[in-house]
Image: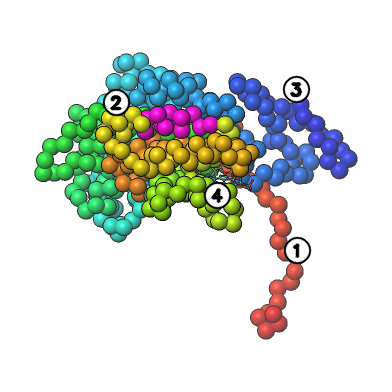
Amino acid sequence: MTTAKLILNGQEYEFPVMVGSEHEVAIDFTKLRAQTGAIAYDPGYGNTGSCESEITFIDGEAGILRYRGYPIEQLAEKSSFVEVCYLLVYNKLPTAAELAAFEQKLTYHTLLHEDMKKFFESFPGTAHPMAIMSATAISLSAYYPEFLDPEIIDLNIVRLLAKFKTIAAYAYKRSIGQAYIYPRNDLSYTEDFLHMMFAVRTEPYEVPEVLSRALDLLLILHADHEQNCSASTVRMVGSSQANLFASVAAGVSALWGPLHGGANQAVIEMLEKIHADGGDYKKYMNMAKDRDSGFRLMGFGHRVYKNFDPRAQILKKAADDVLGALGVSDPLLEIAKNLEEIALNDSYFVERKLYPNVDFYSGIIYRAMGIPTDMFTVMFALGRLPGWIAQWKEMRNDPATRINRPRQIYTGATERDYLPVDQR
Ligand code: SDX
């Protein structure tokens, strides 16, 4: 299977066939327009590969997700988020010494320039924290102008990984009118974030281990997902040689959408609405099947996973474990489980291969941890940051990278002459 033949207007053309390390097959259309004058048309890019990548492999039919070849189930059980950051960004599991050195670098770059605190005050108290995350991410390029020097780029990668959680925690404190809690060098990545979120200046706060462990798991599960909407956005922006901070700020914006990372917030709002409406989840399942209802079952469906999202399976169990350990009983969890049970046996969902995705259970755990709903997508961004960075770095180091510039099929007016205003 080395070539694919195409017949267009009676002429036959041949194109190379690519086969990936997991036996995925692609037709290489790099020369399609030059050879045929035609372009491929694939709105939403559901059938289009934008790049070759060594970072993450997903098999949607088999429910497989691997970061750099390591199964998500093993990383979720045995790794830490900081170790997964290293794996994704530097393409290897670190030795103990490498991990310690990396943690040390992250620890010593958590502080923001004091001037940056003005950004948070300049937003209205009602500002959605994702607006603050995107705006503050790109502002880092004003403080750390990126040169093309690989060493500066690597330092900026560390700065972004370290400061992103400080920005997230400050955005939260700003939204509740509390004083910022500075990062602490004696805490791990997840302990430090939770301390900045929940400590107050007037009394000590010790982060419960169950919370820091739950957060590590949540961040690992969100760390990368190959060419999803936000990662593709980061690659698109970076392909123009825009700097890392600007590219990630664009990724934050793409993730915010309710069809993407914003779904975890939309899931909880949906479950709260069902709960407030007497918990009649069957009524909402019927609405989800009626396209005219305008109601969509948030947290269900996926462009790639067509049997199950392995992350949702891990999170469903984690929800039981974390809520049990915290002694929290949440009626929304029962509603979620009932919705899943019905969907797994309903032809509308089964025919369309709609199953719970990563966003369906994650919000229930964040909620039990005391994280407010409008911070859920920020938590997704915190987890996805190393994936965005790894995708950006791979794109920038790939000699095959060209500025991303898709074509179109024009369907507008054909040529016509301009009419003076008194003749229109
Ligand atoms: C993430 O790409 C990634 O990897 C993303 C992500 C990552 O880690 O980066 O995994 C994270 O974004 C997960 C998805 C979170 N979004 C949601 O939960 C929002 C609800 N889900 C959908 O809007 C939808 O399923 C998408 C956006 C996830 C996928 O959209 P597609 O692949 O474009 O599918 P579609 O919208 O064309 O739907 C196909 C059919 C349609 O019905 P018909 O036209 O065939 O009659 O399925 C229906 C849709 O109406 N459908 C749903 C549905 N999702 C799809 N019907 C009811 N409820 C839903 N949730």
Q: Earlier along the polypeptide chain: callout 4 or callout 3?
A: 3
405, 19: nearer the viewer: 19
The residue at the point 80 percent across, 35 percent down is 6
Badge 2 density bin: few <14, some 14–19, many ≥20, Cα 10 Å: some
Describe residue 240's horizontal placement relative to residue 201 as left or right.
Answer: right
The amino acid marked with disc number 3 is: Met
Mark sitting on residue 414: 1
* Residue depth check, mark 4 versus mark 1: number of the one nearer the observer: 4
Image quarter for ligand 1? top right
Do callouts 4 and 1 mark residues in contact (Cβ within 8 Å)?
no
- Dot placed on the residue nearer the N-terminal end, 2 or 4: 2
Front tag of 4 and 3: 4
Q: Is mark 2 within 8 Å of ligand 1?
A: no
As drawn, the label of residue 286 is 4
Q: Which quarter of the rendered picture does the C terminus lie within?
A: bottom right
Q: Position of residue 287 (x, y in %)?
A: 54, 52
Q: Which residue is mark 3?
A: 1
Q: Determine whether 275 is above or below 150 in the image.
A: below
